[in-house]
Image (spheres, rainbow, N blue to C red):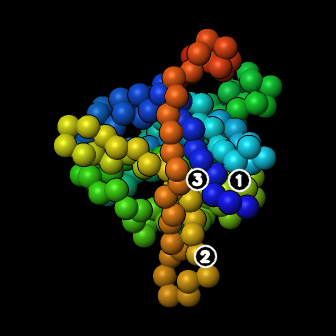
Amino acid sequence: MRQPTVFVASTAVDAMTAEARRCHPVETGGMLIGWDDFEAGHLVVATIIGPGPNAEHHTWGFTPDGAWQQEQLDRIYVATGGRLTFVGDWHVHPAGGFGMSRRDRRTMAATADEPESRLEVALMGLLAKDGERYRLGMWTLGDRRWPLGPPTALPLPTATWTPTPGEAFWGPLDVA
């Protein structure tokens, strides 16, 4: 399978950026919610779930409020009749740096290896501070056979779009 293009709703980018600004100068992140269409060669990120009210934020990482995130994911899944589901994770590098760290790559591999994630492609969104702005990229796992370290990460083609009322079938969603 060739690498998919990732289409990210501008509203999801706005929500990630708002969360990054709220937590600056520490890391934050959450879940990417959407769907895949591998026959068309793309993944779609329609919205996000934030870190949750009991998340722990640190300079070089964060621990999400997993129970809260799962409740939000379940609610979205049910409300959309299963059309929207977990497609990956996202996080922020508040000090900049657009490369995936060793921890980032290991996290992505662990998520991909989790049977309940049901991911065909491991997806990690990275929002990196670049001056006063944030830059968004999407990554997937590269070579996982590398014997002396973590897997490699490959950037994916990424585009944003502004959802029309017809595309915004999922409705307004909480991202806290």
Residue 97 position by quadrant: bottom left
Q: Is residue 162 left or right of residue 88?
A: left
Judged from the image, the secondary structure of the residue bearing numbered disc 2 is loop
Residue annotated with mark 2: 144
Instruction: Give the answer, above or below, for where 24 lies relative to 72.
Output: below
Residue annotated with mark 1: 119
State which tag comes first along the sequence, 2 or 3: 3
Residue 53 is situated, as x and y percent measured from the top left of the image, at 45, 33
> How packed is label 1: few (under 14 Cα within 10 Å), some, or many (20 or more)?
some
State which tag comes first along the sequence, 2 or 1: 1
Judged from the image, the secondary structure of the residue bearing numbered disc 3 is loop
> How packed is label 2: few (under 14 Cα within 10 Å), some, or many (20 or more)?
few
How far apart are the alpha carbons under marks 1 and 3? 8 Å
Residues marked 1 and 3 touching at CB (< 8 Å): yes
Count of numbered marks: 3
Residue furthest left as drawn: 131
The residue under the point 30% across, 32% down is 22
The residue under the point 52% across, 28% down is 161
The amino acid pointed to by label 2 is Arg
The amino acid pointed to by label 1 is Leu
Residue annotated with mark 3: 123
Q: Is residue 84 left or right of residue 91?
A: right
